[in-house]
Image (tube, rainbow, N blue to C red):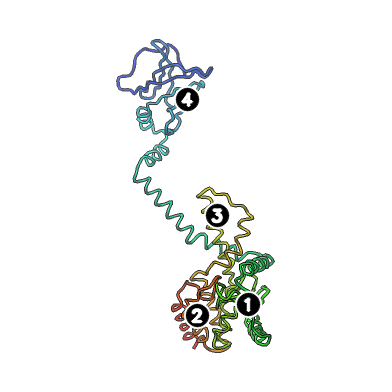
Amino acid sequence: MPGLNGPDQAATDGLSAQGVFFDGRSSRDHPATLLLDGDQVRVRLGAQTEHHWRADQVTLEAALPGVRRSLSFPDGSRFETPDDVVIRAWERRHGRNRLLGGVRRLEGSWGTALGAVAVTGAVLWGTVTFGIPALARQAAAVTPVGVLATFDRETLQVLEDQNLIAPSGLSAARQAQLQSAFRDVSGWAGGPYRYRLLLRDGEPAGGGGMGANAFALPNGTVVMTDQLVALASSDRELTGVLAHEVGHVTHRHGLAGVYQALGLSLIVTALTGDVVSGATFAAAVPVALVQGGYSRAAETQSDTVAARFMLERYRTTRPLQAILARLEAQEGGAGGGPDLLSTHPGTEARIEHLRQLEDAAR
């Protein structure tokens, strides 16, 4: 209970701190001395007036950097002091704010601070390396098929606007042959996609376009350039390419790549504070499809799809191996889109993987 005009003596083995006292009835502060002795808490104002409480009646606020320590009392009054050393000693003696005290000690440790920075960096790295790709794959898997047509249409528009592709120069008869091969591949693959093969000139300006290339868009559109057709030594090679690209469609690799790229952009936006509108992200979708490559796992998965098709039809994967090697020899398969010869994994590793699949099928 609070008392007035108590004994005018300080405990010889207690703790004391200077500060200010608020009586709970006005905002005026009064210079005062805090006396902490065992289970007794006393606040002395001047020479005669003293308030006292039991320790279990006192509410002690947790420490905050730059803020005076505050003790609140049952009658609404409180005492504030900048003397954190005394208050911390009393906290330890009475077991107050143990958890927060531990946090404060951790905050004051350089080693802990550096460790926290390292942990934060590791979490961020893990999120970018594993978390975002995993979420992107899940998002791609549940995206409605009706949405995919928009991605195909807008991406083709970007390619045409940038003069990267133009109508094919192949004869009608040659195009019909390749369309027939594609129908065989897409019919074998199945799925809800609106498959179509677009044969296009990959160098409409005589250079600087997509060159010898093939790539797939999310809704089943596969683009193959005249330059790739000219590079092939047989239609079996081109069929292997088409099966590979259909593998990207059925496993939604292109769409997952888009979500991954936009997810990383969102993290960068959050860290930098840059505001990017939803319209900007929508406009970035075709760019991500055009410029993005595939991951190592995605390329391996699509090569496996192509190998299954070729082994069923021709009992060998050698045609696909041959055109991969030829693309590698021709400037490393350089091009402007998510091309057949992606850099992950390397061509040699992909060819070896196809060989192993063929050997395992014998």
Q: Amino acid at mark 4?
A: Ser
| Residue 327 numbered mark, or none | 2
Depth check, mark 3 against mark 4: the one in front is: 3
Instruction: Decide if residue 157 is on the left or right side of residue 294.
Output: right
Q: Identify the residue at image location x=56%, y=59%.
A: 262
| Residue 72 numbered mark, or none | 4
| Residue 266 numbered mark, or none | 3
Label 2 and label 1: CA atoms lie apart by 18 Å
Q: Amino acid at mark 2?
A: Leu
- For the question of whether residue 46 can be seen, the reply is yes
Q: Amino acid at mark 3?
A: Leu
Label 4 and label 2: CA atoms lie apart by 78 Å
Q: Residue furthest front?
A: 206
Give the camera-side residue of 353 and 203.
203
Label whose residue precedes the other's in the sequence (3 or 4) = 4
Give the camera-side residue of 2 and 43.
43
Q: Which residue is mark 1?
A: 200
Label whose residue precedes the other's in the sequence (2 or 1) = 1
Q: Position of residue 327 (x, y in %)?
A: 50, 80
Q: Position of residue 141 (x, y in %)?
A: 60, 66
Label 2 and label 3: CA atoms lie apart by 35 Å
Label whose residue precedes the other's in the sequence (1 or 4) = 4
